[in-house]
Amino acid sequence: MALAFAFTNGFHDTANVVATSISTGALPPQLAVLIAALLNFAGAFISISVAATVANDVVDAAVITPTIVFAGLIGAIAWNLITWWQGLPSSSSHALIGGVVGSAVAAVGFDAVLAEGLVGKVLIPAVVAPIVAFLVAGLGIVLGNQDYGLGVSATAIVLFVLVVLNRMAHVIKPVIYRRLIVLSQRTDLDALMQEVRRVLGEEELHVLDVSSGFDRRQEQGELVFYTSLKNEHQLPRLTERVMQLDGVDVARWKLINVPH
């Protein structure tokens, strides 16, 4: 089912990507689709940040089951096919998020939804992105039509400024660390804390801070580790190692931003 979603994602989103290049005659259709395919394939090896957001920051990872994932994929595939058939530009990532959220709510209830992540990383960007793109594109056209007498294309100047701003954003953007949340029915949280620290240390991770607490009503303790983990590819192995510790019920990761 995941492969079926990937297929619909490919033919659906590729159309959105290459539409402008083809309609303006900048690229022939075959070349535009080939470039889009190659870059999408390469992008999968560069970053899995979007996948990490869907997995950890929108729905509580502790409640996710194969059935919920299956139902979410069915919903996303259905939406992709409907919008493709109607010729409507639509995001497959948002369709998948909506499918997973809907299936999780149906299975567990609204407690499964991480409202902060859903609003901050899905809803707000979905509204802000087209507005920012509209303003930047409009500014580029206005400035690009001006003659500054510099012997240089105004469009080239605009592109240069945007590239500089993009590099500045990379320099001043927050450093991404991860917060590990461990839930356990063990009462000796200090001992468990040391065991988790040992696992993280063996993976060459630095623990920036740690907090602990025990909920008497649910008879469950919570440990929160703020770590220097930046490599997302370590997540599955680390999660498996922590879950193998005696008495660990849940181990999940969340992104945190630490300004320079």
Image (tube, helix red, strand yellow):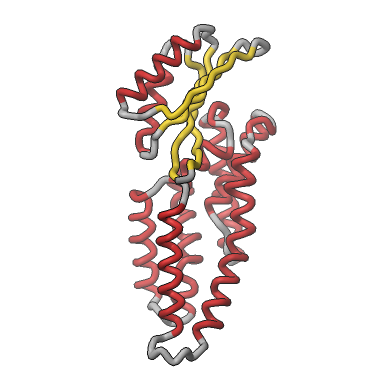
The answer to whether one can see residue 1 in this image is no
Q: Is residue 58 above or below residue 154?
A: above
Looking at the picture, how far across and down is residue 136, in whole percent? 55, 71
Q: Is residue 129 above or below residue 217?
A: below
Q: What number of labels is visible? A: 0
The answer to whether one can see residue 57 in this image is yes
Q: Is residue 129 above or below residue 206?
A: below
Looking at the picture, how far across and down is residue 44, in whole percent? 37, 50
Left or right, 132 with respect to 193, comes to right
The residue at 56%/83% (across/down) is 142
Left or right, 32 with respect to 126, comes to left
The residue at 57%/47% (across/down) is 121
In terms of image quadrants, where is residue 29?
Answer: bottom left
Looking at the picture, how far across and down is residue 83, in whole percent? 60, 60
Q: Is residue 116 above or below residue 246?
A: below
The residue at 39%/31% (across/down) is 236
Q: Residue furthest front?
A: 260
